[in-house]
Amino acid sequence: MSNSKNAVERRTVLLAGGATATAVLTGCVVQAAPPASTPPPAKTPAKAPVSQGTTGAAPGPAALAKVADIPAGGGVILKEQSVVLTKDASGKVCAFSAICTHQGCAVTDVGDGTINCRCHGSKFDATTGERVAGPAKDPLPPVAVQQRDGAIFKA
């Protein structure tokens, strides 16, 4: 009887894990985020006191980069955020961890359709994060992002 209970719990965990994996694999932005008519979740009370000398607008999360600053067919590496942003010729922006899955070195550049790590020569596909060459066995993990107002933000 306890085996049946454990089997159900394992199935539940596996199903939940699959749903989580699906949600995490949204590292590419094909279109902009929904229009501003869909309000974001409130982080502070709607009528928070405003200090003198401020505009009253609550500061939002900082943009990772402007879309225009990401070269088509290339990418940018954001060392402080440990994120690499890539953009294909059609304008689709993707985001991945900038930490190589081989031994934890930071990737060094994006070019010719790959994200490259010079530590040991691993290369990853710039649109999927999948390993293309080198000793790394695992893909670069995707980073969930969204495009708004011509910029890329962590989702």
Image: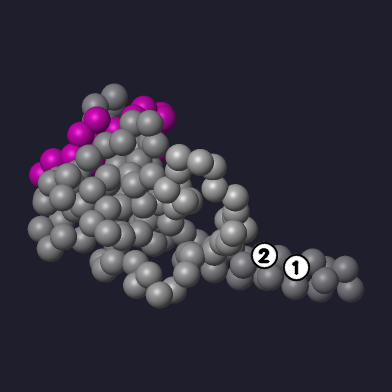
Q: Position of residue 26 (x, y in %)?
A: 39, 62
Q: Position of residue 145 (x, y in %)?
A: 37, 55
Q: Name the kind of residue labelled 1 in the image.
A: Glu
Q: Quadrant of residue 84?
A: top left
Q: Residue at x 41, y 60 (%)?
A: 25
| Image: 131 above or below 127 | above
Quadrant placement of the N terminus: bottom right
Q: Is residue 92 magenta?
A: no
Pick the front one: 79 or 50? 50
Q: Residue at x 23, y 48 (%)?
A: 66
Mark 2 and mark 1 residues within 8 Å of each other at the beta carbon: yes
Q: Residue at x 13, y 41 (%)?
A: 111
Q: Which residue is mark 2?
A: 13
Separation of marks 2 and 1 at Cα, in angstroms? 6 Å
Q: Quadrant of residue 31?
A: bottom left
**Please, what secondary structure does the residue beneath circle 1 have?**
helix
Q: Which label was assigned to residue 9?
A: 1
Q: Name the kind of residue labelled 2 in the image.
A: Val
| Image: 50 above or below 150 | above
Q: Position of residue 21 (x, y in %)?
A: 50, 61
Compared across the picture, whether 8 is left or right of 71 comes to right
The magenta region covers 100-116
Q: Quadrant of residue 78?
A: top left
Q: Is residue 113 magenta?
A: yes
| Image: 139 above or below 103 | below
Q: Residue at x 20, y 34 (%)?
A: 109
